[in-house]
Amino acid sequence: MKLNPTNLYKDAQKRLAELQQIYAEKEQELRRMPAGKIHIVQSKNRVQFYLRENTGDKSGTYLKKSDSGKIKKYVQKAYSEKVIKVISKEIKNLESFLSKSQDTVSQIQQLYSSNPESIKKCIEPVDCSTEDYVKQWCSFEYVGKEIRADTQQYHTDMGEIVRSKSELNIANALHKYGIPYRYECPLKLKNGETIYPDFTILNKATRNNVYWEHRGMMDDRAYAKHAVQRIKDYEKSNIWLGSNLIITEETSTTTLGTMEIEAIIKNYFMG
């Protein structure tokens, strides 16, 4: 695909709704304000306030410090009037943009995805629907790490074999929420080393890969040392914890719960 995912239109719609709400609130606020405008004179050392109660009043009535309540009210009124003026321009621009665009992202995607499979095979698309993208991502073939027959094995809901109960729970939770993943898919780091992250997960919203490493023996010193080094290797390949890298850990006495797994999945992939 040549086009990256965008939330441009959704963000524009959200921004428009926020601005329209603020505009309505400010209009209501101004209707409650008294008539007249404040005139502010600023010099190097002081600020003076004058109340002009009608349009013909060019000088205004000087407001003393004791009139702070009135000053605050009229300064707020002046600010709100300026806010409305600027917001109205942005509302107009966003309404024009949205009415003319009609969500062209979807249109571009459907230029490819609305075709039958026989025609899709003839096209190199610049973009496609999420459904098609997921289908292509899931069709990727790879050879994972060998799991020896004499080691303990766990079978996921997808029929895969994983190495631990926690990995089983992660895999089943991802499947439960319809989140595509690959188990122990090879990944070549920038240092030339090929590693096998426990899970390579597709973030459908961004169409980026997220890597999930579960470290189940953190009370083993040699294991923990290797785990820390692995994070540094990821960072050198621009894979960052909290962004496109998830790390979960457990020891012999502190295990990874299914509620924790589901909370992580919801936070990263369903927000």
Image (cartoon, rainbow, N blue to C red):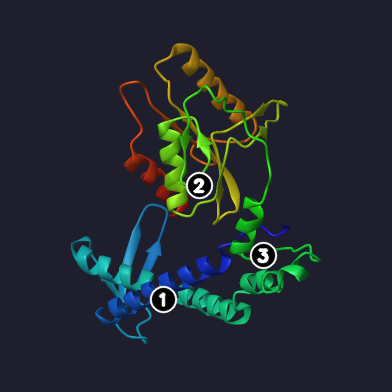
- Left/right placement of residue 132 relative to residue 203 reads right
* Sequence-first tag of 3 and 2: 3
Residue kind at label 3, given as amino acid type: Cys
Residue under the image location 47 percent in, 50 percent down: 175
Which image quarter holds the N terminus? bottom right
Looking at this view, is 247 or 88 the one in front? 247
Choose between 132 and 157: the one closer to the eye: 157
State the quadrant of the C terminus: bottom left
Local crowd size for mark 2, using a 10 Å CA cut-off: few (<14), some (14–19), many (≥20): few
Q: Residue 149 falls in which quadrant of the image?
A: top right
- Residue at (52, 68) in percent of width and height: 10
Q: Earlier in the sequence, mark 1 or mark 3?
A: 1
Residue 83, percent from left and from top: 42, 71
The dot on residue 128 is: 3
Residue 20 disc label: 1
Q: Secondary structure at mark 2?
A: loop
Q: Which mark is residue 267?
A: none
Name which residue type carries label 1. Gln
Q: Residue 209 sits in which quadrant?
A: top right
Q: Secondary structure at mark 3?
A: loop
Above or below, comparing residue 193 to residue 170 in the picture: above
Tell us which disc is closer to us: 2 or 1: 2
Q: Mark 1 or mark 2, which is nearer the start of the sequence?
A: 1
